[in-house]
Image (tube, rainbow, N blue to C red):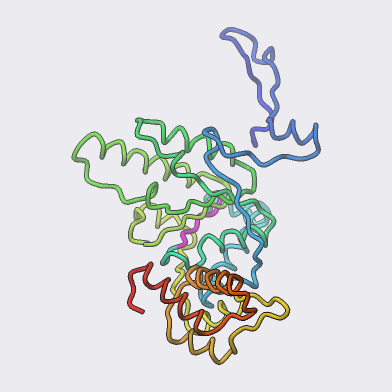
Amino acid sequence: QRNLLWLDGLEQGDPPMSSRLEISRDYLELFMQGRISRPRISMDFPAEFISTELTGEDLVLSPSTIGQIAELENWIKYQDTLMNTWNMKRWLKPGYRALFHGPPGTGKTLTALIIGKNTGRDVFRIDLSMVVSKFIGETEKNLSQLFECAQNKDWILFFDEADALFGKRTNVRDAHDKYANQEVAYLLQRIENHNGLVILASNFKSNIDDAFIRRFQSVIHFPLPSPSERLQLWKNTLPTSVGLKRPQEADLMTISRKYEMTGAGIVNVVQYCCLDSLAKQSGEISVEQIKSGIEREYQKEGKVF
């Protein structure tokens, strides 16, 4: 059932039991070395292991988003009881599919990493450059290898910038449209039958094909942080080294209310401030430095400071 043992090498006309008994490479490694090593990114496995040193306390999200993330973690913890003990596998498809959507820098990737950390699961980010191919049938082949390797592994598959693979199907005007739609249809079938957790991340929910939306158990919005959430991000991100002077909380509150930024933008500003302070050997991060960093970030994003 789990494809750990199988009969192989059977020639046509030979008795079925005369073929050799093969064992999964992962379990052979487990029995020989006592562990299963993570696969390395390659054309046979177009995904890389990602992790973070941050914890759930560092993740600042809106209350509604946090509530939906808790539902996802509940599936990871209780899926076996739900499907087998309660026998809900008669009604429910295997696995769990979630869509994270919202502006860039709002914590979609970090949330996937924290979920993996909280539940003891490895997170693999799919490298779309190694999956998508201009040759007909190659994209489906690459996806097939990926899902076969991830079957029964308790991994979290994370598709960042998922629009490239899960985009809306179009009216067929030429052969290119026909095969592009076939890729989407194939992916729809594979993701629906995968028995693990699959997370898609997109900046815009509207870019994802409606057929996928209907099959997601969770569609979670990551909005821009509110002023109070921005204040928490500033307090979390600014360094707390001994002897380093930081702005007062009242100043940070004023900055949080006045300047709308994402978590990633705040991290960029803090990095600029830290390097500037180190270069000047000032031992202080000032409000003026933070405002200067915000101005640089606004210019980069094409926003008016």
Question: For residue 126: magenta?
Answer: no
Instruction: Using the image as rendered, state which of residue 265 and residue 282 is in the foreground.
Output: 282
Residue found at x 53% / y 80% = 229
Instruction: Indicate the position of residue 38 as horizontal and vertical percent values.
Output: 66, 42
Relative side of 234 to 121, left or right: left
Up-down: is 11 above or below 45? Answer: above
Up-down: is 253 above or below 139? Answer: below
Q: Quadrant of the C terminus?
A: bottom left
Relative side of 291 to 148, left or right: left
Q: Which residues are magenta?
A: 95-100
- What secondary structure is the magenta-colored segment mainly? strand
Residue found at x 31% / y 40% = 180
Instruction: Indicate the position of residue 14 as horizontal and vertical percent values.
Output: 62, 8
Specify the quadrant of the image occupied by residue 186.
top left
Up-down: is 122 above or below 240? Answer: above
Instruction: Indicate the position of residue 242 as horizontal and vertical percent values.
Output: 73, 78
